[in-house]
Image (cartoon, rainbow, N blue to C red):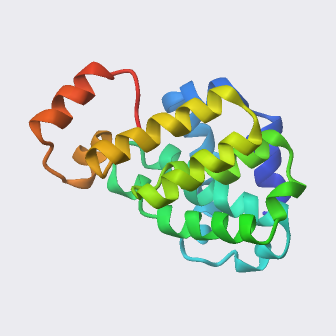
Amino acid sequence: MQPQQVLEFWFERHGYEDWFRGGEPFDAKCRAELGDIHARAVKAELWHWRSGAEGRLAEILLLDQLSRQLHRGDRRAFASDTMAVTLAQELVAQGLDTRLDASQRMFAYLPFEHAESEILQDESVRLFEALGNADALQYAIDHRETIRRFGRFPFRNAALGRQSTPEEIAYMAERADQIF
């Protein structure tokens, strides 16, 4: 499989409803079509894709988004986050993000938003401000506020075997429709 096939699957054959509301039907499509290449990305076997913006974006998608689709509710959903954010940092540092269209850039920036780090959350907000998408910016701000408040995303606690505090339990009950 080539990077363009990953991008075509994600951006041309699927869209917002699948990405953010797809659930198990979309997860099954991801598993069937991209499960094998995801496994290679997790093993860092796709390093040769990193020479261009689209290849790097395809690898980021596999490590960040596909991990969440394939391993929903499991610690493996977040296991590749460090690698995904590292690739995203390099993409931005090299200015390669400017070669991507707005929806592609949003997914290139999501690893910053998914990071349990205030510094990376600040960068996420900066990137989404520059992107100019008000809805995406608000999500970035909400994620940053969660990290500032708790230092982590409480919705991940169960999957990661972390004990939730009473404040986190109340927070999750208030936001049962959101998953960070």
Res. 57 visible in picture: yes
Q: Is residue 53 toward the left or the right of residue 129 in the image? A: right
Quadrant for residue 123, please give it.
bottom right
Farthest residue toward the right?
99
Where residue 96 sits: x, y (%)?
83, 64
Where residue 114 sits: x, y (%)?
49, 50
Residue at 62% from the left image edge and 57% from the top image edge: 62
Q: Is residue 49 toward the left or the right of residue 23 in the image? A: right
110 to 93, vertically: above or below: above
Quadrant for residue 11, please give it.
top right
Quarter of the figure that contains the C terminus: top left
Residue at 34% from the left image edge and 50% from the top image edge: 74
Residue at 62% from the left image edge and 39% from the top image edge: 29
Q: Nearer the viewer, residue 38 or 120?
A: 120
Quadrant for residue 21, please give it.
top right
Question: Total marks drawn?
Answer: 0
Q: Is residue 150 toward the left or the right of residue 110 in the image? A: left
Q: Nearer the viewer, residue 29 or 134?
A: 134
177 to 14, vertically: above or below: above
105 to 120, vertically: above or below: above
Quarter of the figure that contains the N terminus: bottom right
Res. 66 visible in picture: no
Where residue 38 sits: x, y (%)?
60, 61
Residue at 40% from the left image edge and 39% from the top image edge: 145
Where residue 22 sits: x, y (%)?
56, 27
